[in-house]
Every structure is written in C-alpha cells, then in structure tokens.
Image: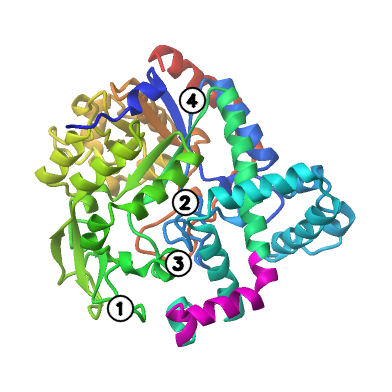
Amino acid sequence: MTATCEVSTILKQRSVGVLLHPTSLPGPLENGDIGHAAYRFIELLHSCGIKVWQMLPLGPTHEDKSPYQCLSAHAGNPKLISLDWLVDREWLDLAHVNSMPADEDYRMQCLQQARTFFYTRTGEEWLVRMEVFKQQHVAWLEDYALFMALKQKYQGQSWFEWPADVRHRDAEAMVESTEQLADEIAQVIFEQFVFFTQWHEVREYAARHNVKMFGDMPIFVAHDSADVWARRQNFLMNENGEMPYVAGVPPDAFSKTGQRWGNPLYDWKYMSDDGFDWWKSRFATQLELFDLIRIDHFRGLEACWMIPADEATAMHGHWEKAPGEALLSALFERFPHLPLVAEDLGVITDDVIALKNHFSLPGMKVLQFAFDGNTENPHLPHQHRSHDLIYTGTHDNDTTLGWVSNENNYSSEFLEAYAACDGISAEEKVLVMLRMAMSSVSFLCVMPMQDLLMLDSEARMNTPGTLDGNWQWRFEWQQVRPEMIDRIKQYIYLYQR
C-alpha cells in the first residue's frame, strides 16, 4: 500500500518561510541561541504573515561548527541554550555571569553552575520533569552522555582513537567509566534536559503565532558521533571503527573530483533485518522538535555513492542500491503522517524521482539554479509544481544579492529576457527574484534571512568544499528594513501566501 505524505495538509494553504539557523540570531555571546531573540524573531515572522521558520540541524557540532556533522543524531546543541532562561528561573546567578569573560567556555561554565542550582534551589516538580525526560529519551541519552564524558576525558579525541576497552565498549569498562564520570554524565544529561525544555517552549510560542518549525535531517551521521560509537552494528565498519567505504557524491558539473564526505555508510542489511529501529528512533526525536523535516541528500535513500576509504577523492566510487522504499514504508507505518520534504537537488535519476513520487514527497526548486539559458530547466518558475518548495537560495548558496551581482553565476541575457529586468540595479533584481519565488505555484516559498535583509556575499552562511569562515553569519536587528518588510507583506498579499 502506498503511504501518503501529509506535508501539504499541515500548512493548509500557500505559505512563506524564512531560512535562518538559530546560531545566526542576534545576541551578546559567540553564537545566537533559543532565548529572547528567538521569541522576537517569531514575532517578526508573525507580523509579516510568514508562517514557517526553517533551520539547519540542531545537533551538537564538532569544532568546525558544521551542523551537518554532529556528535549525535538526537541531542541538541548545548551552545544554543539560553542563559537568560536560566537566570529567569534562578538557576544562574547574574552577578556570577557578569564576572566571567564572554569567551567560548562562558556558556558552558554557566551551565555547570546552573546544574548545581537546579538540584539545590528547584522544587519537586522540576526534579520529576527531569526524570520523565530521562525515561522518554532512554534510547539515546545515556549513551550520548557517556560518549561526551569520555570525549572530555580523552581531550576531544575521536572515539576510534580511545583506548581499546572503551572503544570496543567492553562491559567492565563501561561500568567503570560510568561510575568514574558520573558528574560529567549528569552535566550532559542536565544540558539536554534544559535544551529540550527550552525548545518545546519556543515551539509552543511559535505555534501560538501560527509559525511552523521546519527542521533538517542529514542523511548520514558523523563518524565521530555517539550513534556510531554506541550502535556501530548499523554501519559498515569493524569494531575499531575502520571503514572499507565512506560516503560522498561522484564528479559532476560542480566538482571534477566529486565530494568525499567521509561519513560511515549504513549496513542496510542489518538495518532491514532490525526493522529500521535506528531510523524510527531518530525520527521520533526529530518529530518532537519539528513540524516539517527535510531529508538532506534524499537520493542516498535510493542508492549511495560508495568510495573506497583509502581514496583521497570521490572519483573512484560506485553506486550501491539502498532499500529506500522499505525504509520509508516502515517509517510511514510507524508515523502515519510523516511530514517529509525530499532534498532532491543535483543530478537525480528516474529511480530517485520514482521513490519520491511513490510516497508523494515534496521536492525542492531553487531559483539560483534556474537561469543557465535552458528553457526546460526544472528550476524555472514555469516548470514548478504546486507540490514542491521554491527557494531563492539555500544555506549552501550565495545570498541572492551576491548571486545577481556576479554575472558569472548565470546567463544575464536569459534572466533579463525571462524576468524583464534589463537595466535595473542588483537590489532591484533581488526583488524580481523574490517576486518570482512568491508568485510560483509551489505551496511553500522559502527565502534565506539574508535575502529578506538584502545582504551581499559577506553574509553567506556556507560555501561547499571550503572549511574556513562557514556557519558563522549573524544578523542584527537594525538590518531589518521597514521598507523591505512592507514589500514582503505586499508580496504575501498579492500572491495569496
């Protein structure tokens, strides 16, 4: 029996969304968080008539800050925790906060104090809520907490570099480590309790303001993650964490050598025999956080590009079939109204399209990919379908102002002929792009916050294939221009979004 995705009925009507990761919110610390600025952002969206807040994965990141290579497929990033929220509950002493330097360790030191006050100042109700949280997340929480405690003990080393007994999860070593690191484990669990509690409050506030939360799920997980360490039977690797193959994508028009991501590949036979239990658990957590979920690199559910681990590039890999239909059928059976969106960008085969269509999943169109001069380009507005989402650009693209300012990015002659925008400024061309996206038949139009603010390439969030300077962009409230807000409101009215 074919499952039916309920994404389009969740929103009920044509809508507009904004793409902004919480780390990009304004604030005094090293990154934005889910505190006061998140509530003000929801109010801004509501005041404009914008009904969707899309973001990147929320997991704890490695030092490169990439939300697509997280330390856990379940946990929330403790660096997104609001300190103001802790102060409001008297779990954090404001005098102590103000006496500390606002460096990278600042938030973590505050969280340590907050745990002490939580257990000495709070009432029975909060202690009960903590126990309920631990029970609800028992499938992953204890493993993650021990993983992070061990990672701290071994000074940030990857788990496959740890001593053999903890690397192999020897039963005696696990008991001993759990006892020795009890305080560190309790700290990690406290941070996760606070994160999920704060997030639920933010999500409830968004719901009261008619704003849906739209999350992102990377198809693969990081090699150095609690999921792989604790459940490595789900992945193609030996007990030491050594992998015969790693994930990536083959050479294409954008890269002559392809992309070697290095993520572990799934042992699909084990997962199939296990009834895809790991995936069901992962989706249960994501559905606790979001109203909509995008599967990044959806085509990997149909076939994965397997690269020999000793290859330096992705050139010499091969495609290996994946049981996408069986997996999605199992997920829809477990979650009948699974609100999925397929990231189907790049070179997509007929088999991938068939898989997406079999489950009636919305796909993505991006205007920045549309203007190469080919009138049959599927990203052009006249090719759109109501079932898909339309973006001006994504987190991997330049800002639209940066994009239109560099005519090497597109056929300027074709864009000007298609959109009748010859002889106008770059900012006016951004408005043309926004208008095209808004007027599309696509049920959901999403614009990055940078486009709403009319920002140039310096505000870019990520440049694929590079390591420096990514994931750091943040906006300031004074960048929100009243005339731009009025323009967005007008487009929402004109195009019935």
Residue on which disc 4 sits? 51
Mark 3 is on which residue type? Ser
Foreground mark, 3 or 2, reads 3
Q: Is residue 415 left or right of residue 53?
A: left
Q: Earlier in the sequence, mark 1 or mark 3?
A: 3
Q: Residues within 10 Å of mark 2 (few under 14, many from 20)?
A: many
What residue does disc 1 label? 238
Q: Disc 2 marks which residue?
A: 461
Comes first in the chain, label 3 or label 2: 3
**Measured Cα–Cα span from mark 1 to mark 4:** 46 Å
State left or right for residue 129 relative to residue 267.
right
- Picture residue at 69% right of the left edge, 48% below the top: 82
- What is the crowding at mark 3: few (fewer than 14 residues within 10 Å), some, or many (at least 20)? many
Mark 1 and 3 residues: CB-CB less than 8 Å, in contact? no
Q: Find residue 287 and name its label.
A: none
Look at the image and tell me whether residue 481 can be seen.
no
State if disc 2 and disc 3 touch (CB < 8 Å): no
Task: Tell me the CA gap for discs 3 and 4.
Answer: 34 Å
Q: Please state which amino acid type lies under the numbered disc 2.
A: Met
- Which amino acid type corresponds to the residue marked 4 in the rendered image? Lys
- The mark that comes first in sequence, 3 or 4, is 4
| Magenta stretch, residue numbers | 164-185
Among the two numbered marks 1 and 4 on one chain, the one whose residue lies closer to the N terminus: 4
Q: Secondary structure at mark 3?
A: loop
